[in-house]
Image (cartoon, rainbow, N blue to C red):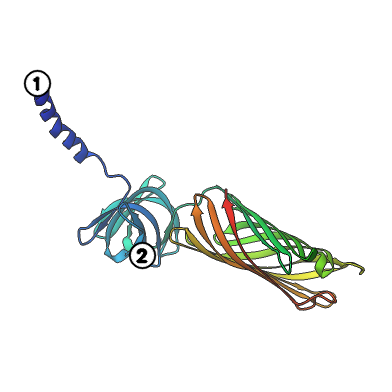
């Protein structure tokens, strides 16, 4: 018993020395006032460094207050001079930061960093399926359902987005809304946030007497914001459209295109607001302008299941004879991300 106790007492300082000498995990931020913050450096933007510490939520620190940064993560860095590099942060002293560029140490003033972000993954994909169903019975029997599915795929500098929407509304056994819509967008990110793209849409709406409408075109766009919380992109373009209404000859011609997509995440993505819209201005026939928008909020329930509230608004300046200019769909449902 005495021998075991002696061995145990001998082990205590050895274990203590191992723990104290073990390296700290994560990135390390040393402040000029002597404070040290350990966590994960997220980005540098607008004169501030954003870090998520091991003990709490992400916050930002003024670059002028930082003595040095250490991180093994490779960052895409833009210097105040406009030069762009890929480097890791290797510490420094009193605001003179050392970065490793292609294996070589380079010293940069801490306030000389205009922007630093983690490189995007070469491959990324996310898909969603939303289901919204309402049934009513009594003096009036009605059923409404909306199914929406989308897939966003990124392969290096190439982005693909496909969306499929089915909307049905029936009152006392007769359809009052029956719309099928497919959208596809391709983006080639050729210079930072700028991209060239192509698009294709198909729409069918028998209630509006629309047998089909095809639109295809080329676009030029720019990502205004694209980070972990905010995504905003806009594009303009030109294309060709063909449409046919029941009992009427086909009509086709050039179109001017506009598209906007916006998503804002809150509470680490548990809650999100989004707004998407596009405008097709037909340069033929009666020069119809077609506006379609989808606005809503989404909040997580469990795992990859979420609830969604959305408002879809369609407007045409020159609808088919007998059809209204506006069409609004309000939906509450659930969805899944995979």
337 left or right of 249 in image: left
The residue carrying mark 1 is 3
Q: Earlier in the sequence, mark 1 or mark 2?
A: 1
> Which of the two residues, 218 or 230, is positioned nearer the viewer here?
230
Q: Secondary structure at mark 2?
A: strand
> Is residue 77 visible from the viewing direction of this image?
no
> Which of the two residues, 217 or 206, is positioned nearer the viewer here?
206
| Residue at the image point whose x is 76% and y is 78% from the top | 317
Q: Secondary structure at mark 1?
A: helix
Q: Quadrant of residue 241?
A: bottom right
Q: Position of residue 219 (x, y in %)?
A: 68, 64
| Residue at the image point whose x is 11% and y is 28% from the top | 10
Q: CA distance from mark 1 to mark 2?
A: 57 Å
209 left or right of 258 in image: right
Q: Quadrant of the N terminus?
A: top left
Q: Position of residue 121 (x, y in %)?
A: 52, 48
The residue carrying mark 2 is 48
Q: Position of residue 175 (x, y in %)?
A: 79, 65
242 left or right of 93 in image: right
In the displayed structure, 253 sits above or below 74; it is below
| Residue at the image point whose x is 80% and y is 69% from the top | 254
Q: Quadrant of residue 284?
A: bottom right
> Is residue 100 visible from the viewing direction of this image?
yes
């Amino acid at each position: 018993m005495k021998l075991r106790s002696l061995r145990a007492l001998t082990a205590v300082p050895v274990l203590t020395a191992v723990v104290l000498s073990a390296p700290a995990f994560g990135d390390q931020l040393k402040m000029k006032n002597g404070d040290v913050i350990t966590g994960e450096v997220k980005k540098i933007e607008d004169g501030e460094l954003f870090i998520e510490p091991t003990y709490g939520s992400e916050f930002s620190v003024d670059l002028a207050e930082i003595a040095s940064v250490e991180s093994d993560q490779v960052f895409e860095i833009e210097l105040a001079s406009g030069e762009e590099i890929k480097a890791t942060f290797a510490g420094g002293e009193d605001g003179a930061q050392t970065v490793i560029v292609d294996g070589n140490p380079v010293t940069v003033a801490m306030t000389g960093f205009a922007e630093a972000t983690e490189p995007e993954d070469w491959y990324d994909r996310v898909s969603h399926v939303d289901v919204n169903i309402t049934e009513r019975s009594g003096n009036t029997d009605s059923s409404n359902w909306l199914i929406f599915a989308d897939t966003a795929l990124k392969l290096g500098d190439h982005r693909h987005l496909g969306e499929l929407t089915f909307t049905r509304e029936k009152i006392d056994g007769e359809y009052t809304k029956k719309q099928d819509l497919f959208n596809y967008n391709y983006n080639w990110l050729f210079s930072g946030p700028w991209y060239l793209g192509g698009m294709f849409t198909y729409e069918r709406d028998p209630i509006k007497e629309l047998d089909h409408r095809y639109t295809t075109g080329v676009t030029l766009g720019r990502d205004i914001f694209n980070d972990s919380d905010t995504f905003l992109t806009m594009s303009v373009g030109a294309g060709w459209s063909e449409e046919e209404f029941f009992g009427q000859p086909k009509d086709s011609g050039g179109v001017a295109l506009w598209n906007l997509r916006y998503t804002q995440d809150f509470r680490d993505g548990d809650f999100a607001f989004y707004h998407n819209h596009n405008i097709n201005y037909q340069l033929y026939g009666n020069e119809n302008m077609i506006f379609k928008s989808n606005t809503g909020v989404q909040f997580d329930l469990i795992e990859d299941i979420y609830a969604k509230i959305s408002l879809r608004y369609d407007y045409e300046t020159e609808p088919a004879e007998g059809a209204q200019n506006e069409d609004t769909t309000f939906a509450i449902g659930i969805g899944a991300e995979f």
